[in-house]
Image (cartoon, rainbow, N blue to C red):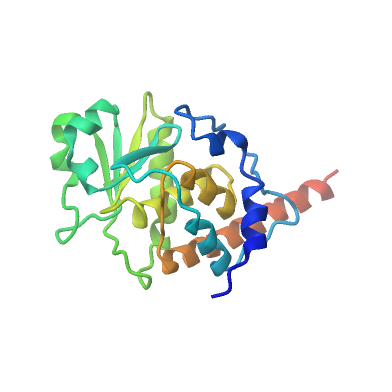
Amino acid sequence: MKISFQFISEQLSLIQPEYMQRSSKMHHTRDSSSLTSSTSYETPALSDLQQLLWLRGSSDNHVDQVWPNIYLGDAWAARSKTTLQSLNITHILNAADGPYSINTGAKYYADLQIEYYGVEAFDDPSFDLSIFFYDAANFIGKALNSSGGKVFVHCAMGVSRSATLVLAFLMIHENMTLVDALKTVSAHRNICPNAGFLSQLRDLDMKLNEERKRTRASAIKGL
């Protein structure tokens, strides 16, 4: 695979300083603006998106806050009630639900009064995770809109299945491009969605980008 160093340098130049500083505070804002949103934005090739993920240097903790009140992590954190309580988690999205994976379920968290949503997904490039994008994004959005809501999204390692669903949320509910979403999450945690999931996110990105273009065209036409 030929590495496009120009693409990487161009995308790095768009990262805001606060992301690079890795400050302990979250400096994100919840407006609908996007770092790379413009009439000229086009979804990058899969290989270019994968190159962005090679630029590791963030956290490999059991759990990390990657967006205000959104925590991304692994199975250890999912089973650690002490950790969840210390973070004041109110909602959990398990992207590795099922008897052959992280089989916690709602009953496991009954004593913590945590709202649970499970997605029985497999970390396989051929698995269609996109069918859960909107339901998962709506669950995360509901959690953030609730009083004191904090959501923990996890799978086994907290880098592929769960990361993909967080990226989809940022694209659907926060109006981010896929590039912006990748940079936002990667600034706080090392992630690595498999090639199949990344391709599904590309499809979502192209769909949302076309919708944005139509919205802008309609707005201009109405002037």
**Which of 75 and 5 lies nearest the eye of the viewer?**
5
Quadrant placement of the C terminus: top right
Left or right, 86 with respect to 218, comes to left
**Residue 196's x, y, as percent?**
43, 69
Q: How many marks?
A: 0
Residue 31 in view: no
Q: Quadrant of residue 151?
A: top left
Quadrant placement of the N terminus: bottom right
Residue at 54% in and 29% down: 27
**Residue 159's x, y, as percent?**
36, 53
Q: Is residue 109 above or below residue 137?
A: above
**Residue 25's x, y, as percent?**
47, 27
Q: Quadrant of residue 139?
A: top left
Residue at 25% in and 54% down: 156
Q: Residue furthest bottom?
A: 1
Q: Residue furthest right?
A: 223
**Which of 122 and 18 lies nearest the eye of the viewer?**
18
Q: Quadrant of residue 17?
A: top right
**Residue 126's x, y, as percent?**
37, 73
Left or right, 157 with respect to 80, comes to right
**Which of 75 and 10 lies nearest the eye of the viewer?**
10
Residue at 25% in and 42% down: 116
Left or right, 10 with respect to 185, comes to right
Residue 212 in view: yes
